Each structure stands twice: as C-alpha cells, then as structure tokens.
Amino acid sequence: MKTETIAYKNIYFVYAFSLFLFFISWFALASRTIPLFFPSPWLVLLAFQEMIKDGTLWGHIQISLFRILTGWAIGSGLGIPLGLLMGDIRFIRNMLNPYVQFFRFIPPISFVTLSLIWFGMGETSKVVLIIYTTIFIVTINTIAGVMSVNSIHVQSALSLGANRFNIFIRVIFPSTVPFLLTGMRLAMGNSFMTIVSAEMIAADKGLGFLIFTSRLFMQTEKIFVGIISLGILGFVVDAIFRFAINKCAKQYLFFFKEK
C-alpha cells in the first residue's frame, strides 16, 4: 500500500514538473515575439477569464460537446452491430467490405459542403459528419475483434452443445469488447478533429467557430482559448470513458458469459 502511494506521488510530481517546464518554455517563447504571433500564457488566461465571465466560452463548449457526443454515440451504435455482423458472417463481410475500405480513406471535411446541401445549416449536418467519422473506425476495430477470436474457444463451445447464438453471445462478443471499446475511444479523438472543420465552415457557435472568427479578427489569444478548451475537453471526456471502461467492462463480460 505504501509503495502504491509513493508511486502515485511520483506520478503527480512528474506531471507537475512537466507542466512547469511547459509554461516556462511558453513564457520564454512568447517573450521573444509579439502577442499577435504568439501570446503569453497571461494573455490567454485573461482571455479565458473574459469569456468565462460573459458566458460565451461555456456556450461554445456546450454546443460542440453536444454535437460530438451525439454523433459519436450514433456512429458507435451503428458501427458495433455492423462490425459484429461483418466479422461473423463472411457473406456480409465480402459484400460490405469494399465500401468500408473505400469510404474510410475519404476525410470527413470532404463532405462538409455536401452535408450542408443535403442537411442544411442546422445541427444535423454537423452530427452526420461526426457519425461518418465514427462509424468506420468502430466497425473496423469490431471486425478485427471478431476475427481474432480463438477458434479453439469456438470449437470447445460447439463440443459442449452450444448453438450459434450462444457462441456469439458467450464467446465472440465478450472477446470483441476490448476491440470495440478501443475503436470507440479512437473515434472520439477523430470526432474532436472533425467538429472543428465542420464548425469553421458552417456554424454560428462552437469551439471551431470560435477559432475561425478569432482568426478573422486577429485575436490570437482567443484562438489559443479555443485550442486549449478542445484539448481539456477531450482529455476529460477520454478520462471519463476510460474510468467507465475500468468500472464496467468486467461486469459486462461476466454478464454475457453467465447469461
């Protein structure tokens, strides 16, 4: 117990030291140039305070987070069953694999204009882009999970009299959970990148919109506010997702194996 406590303290010390070096480097670099080019941490902090006081920062964060989580949840909800089916049924995999492999190489920003034409300037166009970003990453990782299942486990279940449905529920799906969770986590990171490009072109609110409009008015410190907010928001969401995985994954695996 004491060893674990010391280890945690060492980790926090490393984190604090790393942040200290980061801000010292930032101050040093900012002191050698003009604020328009590279603002100091103090100017960025003042911009943070100003936007927090007038409520604009929270408004941008709230709408961006809504778009990201909505698109990510829908995309994951579509990608997981699609990946399970493609991984387990060869006919479906052979039929859909060319489309998955084709579209996953086309960046979402390529469809920004089309999404505006098809879905308008509202929330739907942004959410659809996040769904597009998410679905292929989750699908491919889920397929990989299904196809990595040890055939010996399947054969053992068959020898014990399990039918195809029971094998899928008790063997294939539990073995695939780590892969699909990894795919969801990777897709979350891509969703943050996609929302910036979508909001820069077609939005009147959001962190991407904040970055774009700040560029137009040469407010570099507000650009930093938008970028840092995205990083913090992504860090927090990822930490919550990892915490949920650590708490719930074993229980879900046990549930499906015992069912």
Image (cartoon, rainbow, N blue to C red):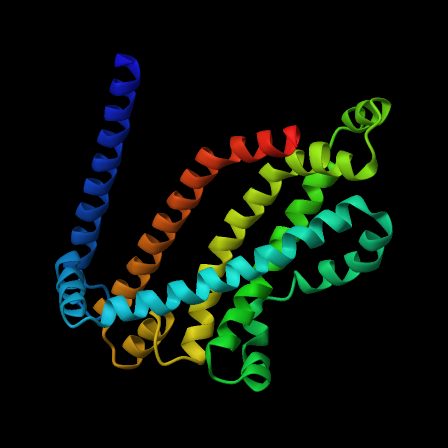
- In the image, is 232 to the left or to the right of 113? left
Image quadrant in which you'd find residue 209: bottom left
Image quadrant in which you'd find residue 19: top left
Residue furthest to the top in view is: 2
Query: In the picture shown, does residue 5 fall above or below 22?
Result: above
Q: Residue at x 46, y 76 (%)?
A: 123
Q: How many marks?
A: 0
- In the image, is 164 to the left or to the right of 193? right
Which is nearer the eye, 158 or 115?
158
* Picture coordinates of residue 58, whole percent (x, y): 26, 66
* Picture coordinates of residue 139, whole percent (x, y): 66, 52
Q: Residue at x 52, y 58 (%)?
A: 73
Quarter of the N terminus within the rendering? top left
Q: Residue at x 38, y 43 (%)?
A: 239
- In the image, is 125 to the left or to the right of 243? right
Which is nearer the eye, 32 or 206?
206
